[in-house]
Amino acid sequence: MEESERYQRGWQKLKEIDGEAGERVIESLRDIAPDFAKYIIEFPFGDIYSRPALDLKSREIAVVAALTALGNATPQLKVHIQGALNVGCSKQEVVEIIMQMAVYAGFPAALNGLFAAKEVFAEREDAA
Amino acid sequence: MEESERYQRGWQKLKEIDGEAGERVIESLRDIAPDFAKYIIEFPFGDIYSRPALDLKSREIAVVAALTALGNATPQLKVHIQGALNVGCSKQEVVEIIMQMAVYAGFPAALNGLFAAKEVFAEREDAA
Amino acid sequence: MEESERYQRGWQKLKEIDGEAGERVIESLRDIAPDFAKYIIEFPFGDIYSRPALDLKSREIAVVAALTALGNATPQLKVHIQGALNVGCSKQEVVEIIMQMAVYAGFPAALNGLFAAKEVFAEREDAA
Amino acid sequence: MEESERYQRGWQKLKEIDGEAGERVIESLRDIAPDFAKYIIEFPFGDIYSRPALDLKSREIAVVAALTALGNATPQLKVHIQGALNVGCSKQEVVEIIMQMAVYAGFPAALNGLFAAKEVFAEREDAA
Amino acid sequence: MEESERYQRGWQKLKEIDGEAGERVIESLRDIAPDFAKYIIEFPFGDIYSRPALDLKSREIAVVAALTALGNATPQLKVHIQGALNVGCSKQEVVEIIMQMAVYAGFPAALNGLFAAKEVFAEREDAA
Amino acid sequence: MEESERYQRGWQKLKEIDGEAGERVIESLRDIAPDFAKYIIEFPFGDIYSRPALDLKSREIAVVAALTALGNATPQLKVHIQGALNVGCSKQEVVEIIMQMAVYAGFPAALNGLFAAKEVFAEREDAA
């Protein structure tokens, strides 16, 4: 069944990229909007992230940049800083991407992105 | 002299990434805000893009993503779609980055990014 | 007196839509910007919400959508999720409006809107 | 086949809501990003707009509000002003929704929304 | 009558600040949303700009900064660059305000603000 | 050495405007992105704020307006409300600037700006 394949492919991709942080997001939707949890797995992860024409590291660079620039989705930025590290970015590369956003979205956006990265890096140290 | 080095390094970097489109931006500022032209060369290009810890292709992926997501700077997005192609992204990779922004900034932002890319790709064909 | 009518009409409308949450916002402004409290009652509520050409339920659908999409005013979004429920939206309808914003403002905006709704729904359960 | 059902359901829904304006958007993507055209039909229209728990008129109220507030997607706002009129909003209701955005996103956003509506209303008169 | 006083005070203030450009905005609303024209005169100009606790030059500095930073309301930015010049800002001061937005909203926002200023300055030369 | 002069000039300017709050921001970057701390001192403060063509009070009016309007950088808004008070704005003037943003970015942006100001004013009272 086609749909089920999208879901399964998406679920694998979500776990590969976002790990436990991604699973917690899905879990937190179960009572209020279970269909939205299903859509997240199917469309962003099953359709978009699964496309072969761009590697996952490049995709996460794009997402960390965009969420830093938009500046209104800190929890998702933190999940994707994790994601970037999970798929091969170094901490220094994450810092570089966020710093570059000072040019395109202003210094406050970059500052808040750096503080989010600082928290994520500390959590990973604690978990290590 | 330190400042002059930043300026020269920045000017080389701007030409490498944005080519003629970048030079035209600088030129268009000469009468209204010449110091701002100088700052653009020195800070974004002389300081940020010249940092060795992230390659230029990754930097342009980040910028195309952010400008697509912000959605309020189409001229600059077009310059950086050119920039991305100039430093090694394929057209398909540019399209993938922009499509991915549908997930993070909505379908209208991605649509408008794709239309900007379509214009840039056509201009390059004409120039070829 | 004309102004006094606007104020009285606005105050009734604010209580009808936002209930105690709205009154608390007004109260919180008394020391720092009492005139701004007056303007809120007069213009948004006395002028705009009091216009007969669109029903209150439709107005709250519009506001929940806009605040979810903008994503930078969570306290006000929560007040208006309350407002939407107060003027006739079901919880499921609120969830649908917010989910739809994934298409127009991205999945993070919709996610954060759903988490705001989850908090508001829980508060109402506790108050029941 | 599940996917094909989503696509067919989405295509019908897109034509019902956005009419020819929607079809033109899809057509304009055929050369640059045909898969994105497919995703637009499948996810926003096949999945979201097809959900029965909120009527189409309410969905279009939400979208016109959000796109007016975001203010960076005028072509899409115009398509959805058409859409709102197509699924049962009166011109006056569209004007009310946009005016209300002055409160939540500022007077410039509302002004630009009204000017977009003015253009759409004029086009429909011409086409009548 | 209180309301009429607000309207008259607002109309005088709008003409003082925005001059003919402001009158044209009001005129352009007469057919589609005449009440919105009235609200613009009454609330922003009759209430806010008429408050004595901040001078008009400081108010226009604030507005040029905000509209440059938001970046999605170019027509209104141009009206207020006119306004800033009308109430005592020099061209150089306008340029400084816009340049400063590079720090808080990014270089593209500042660039687009400078290009808007360039157009306004040229129009004033032509009209002189 | 040119660079060192920019740094020293910037550091003096940062202390003059933002005081201890600014120094804490710089300090907080030392471990994660020391170069970004250096850039903040050099470009915004050493280059932009040090330009003589606009006084510091006008610059802080512009920044408080922009950060209130953008609405996604509360910590930086609070630092600059402090900054505005440090370089000569009265509390009432700060309140007026923020209130005016209701017109250009909506009432929620202005409300959240006023609540930020309320916190800053309280902290200053406590420190007095």
Image (cartoon, coloured by chain):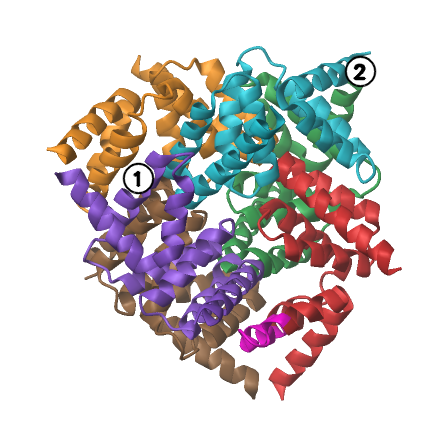
Chain colours: A orange, B cyan, C brown, D purple, E red, F green
Q: Quadrant of the N terminus of chain B?
A: top right
Instruction: Name the secondary structure under disc 1.
Output: helix
The amino acid on which the numbered mark 1 sits, given as a three-letter code, is: Tyr
What's the residue at 71%, 15% (across, down)? B12
Mark 2 vs mark 1, foreground winner is 1
Give the residue pinned by disc 2.
Answer: B4
Q: Would you name the residue on which mark 1 appears?
A: D39
Question: Height in image: F118 above or below D90?
Answer: above
Q: Amino acid at mark 2?
A: Ser
Residue F104 forms part of the magenta stretch: no
Residue C127 pos. (x, y %): 22, 60
Instruction: Say if labels 2 and 1 share a chain.
Output: no
**Residue depicted at x 28% and y 27%:** A21
Q: Where residue F13 appears, x then y in whole percent? A: 75, 31
Q: How many marks?
A: 2
Q: Position of residue A79 (x, y in %)?
A: 35, 28
**Depth check, front residue: E124 or D22:** D22
Residue B26 shows up from this direction: yes
What is the chain letter for disc 2? B
Q: Is residue F88 visible?
A: no
Main SS class of the magenta portion in the image = helix
Q: Position of residue E11 (x, y in %)?
A: 70, 75
Up the image or down, B34 lies above or below C32; here it is above
Please indicate whether residue A23 sits to the left or right of residue A79 in the image. Answer: left
Position of E43 relative to A113 (above/below): below
Farthest residue toward the right?
E128
Q: Quadrant of residue D124?
A: bottom left
Q: Nearer the viewer, residue E22 or F76?
A: E22
Looking at the image, which residue is at 58% across and 27% down?
B124
Residue found at x 47% / y 25%: B91
Report the side of B22 relative to B58 (left or right). Answer: right
